[in-house]
Image (tube, helix red, strand yellow):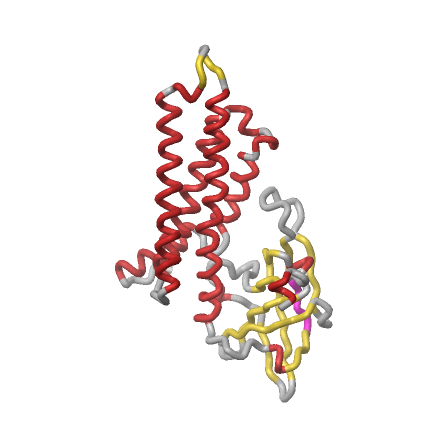
Amino acid sequence: PDLISGKKIGCFGLTESEAGSDPSSMKTNFNETNDEYILNGSKNWITNAPIADVFIIWALNEKKEVSGFILDKDTKGLNTSYIKNKTSLKISPTGQIILNDVHIPKNKILPKTNGWKSVFSCLNKARYGIAWGVLGAATQSWLIAKEYTENRIMFKKPLAANQLIQKKLADMQTEINIALSACLHTGRAMDKNMDTKVAISILKRNNCKKAINVVREARDMLGANGLLEENHIMRHLVNLETVKTYEGTEDIHSLILGKFQTNIDAF
């Protein structure tokens, strides 16, 4: 309840330094005793890790079966650190989680999880949210470029009076609205409990790519002014570089879709 209300901050500890696109290669592990679990390992690139009150940690047992655990920030043996000098998502505190002989009672395991199915269920929800979110950055950049070109006078007329500029604006509007429609239809399918895993991979791959293209085009339309912080374009662009990477890179989603089509695993 405190997480829902915002009184407490949580984080999702899955990614490791050598287990990003392939989470099954994680090294974080747990051992079970009569009355507790003991966790060891580390997580990296975890959003909110340095400021989190509640940690969801995924770990493997000796049989390589994955389970999730709930840890409080004051748990003995749990430590965090900041990842410094990021040039993207600067407002988001990202960090590492170190687990050194962390002893937790048995009621701290997530009892209703079902192995990797549960992990990827969480990831798919996040991927769907991202598919919407990137379009916000794209839409804002499109509208900034539209306003700028309408007011920027070049060769004694507004920049927007040029056919090339109007075509670029039309392309931006088209790509954004097609992507929004795809998100809407997928959401309606989710409401009907339909299988949307493949659709979400299409959305995550397509919308991130198209959003970056829109923002880059907007930056170009503003010329050197597109590099200024006050115009926000570069902020959106560097943030989208992060979003394009996390929750499954573009290449990973390409392989997911390729496997779906051919039934051949290329991972």
Residue range (magenta): 97-101
Residue drawn at x 66%, y 68% is: 99
Residue 119 appears at what percent x and percent y?
A: 48, 68
Residue 127: in magenta span? no
Where 245 sits versus 225, above or below? below
Residue drawn at x 68%, y 70% is: 72
Tell me if residue 64 can be seen.
no
**Foreground: 246 or 99?**
246
| Left-right relation of 35 to 250 | right
Residue drawn at x 60%, y 58% is: 46
Q: Main secondary structure of the magenta part?
A: strand
* Residue closest to the far bottom: 34
| Left-right relation of 216 to 174 | right
Where 257 sits versus 101, above or below? above
* Residue closest to the far left: 262
Tell me the quadrant of the picture where the N terminus can be found.
Answer: bottom right
Where 263 sits versus 209, above or below? below
Residue 185 appears at what percent x and percent y?
A: 35, 54
Residue drawn at x 61%, y 31% is: 230
**Foreground: 21 or 104?**
104
Tell me the quadrant of the picture where the C terminus can be found.
Answer: bottom left
Quarter-of-image position of residue 177: top left
Residue 78 appears at what percent x and percent y?
A: 69, 68
* Residue closest to the far top: 156
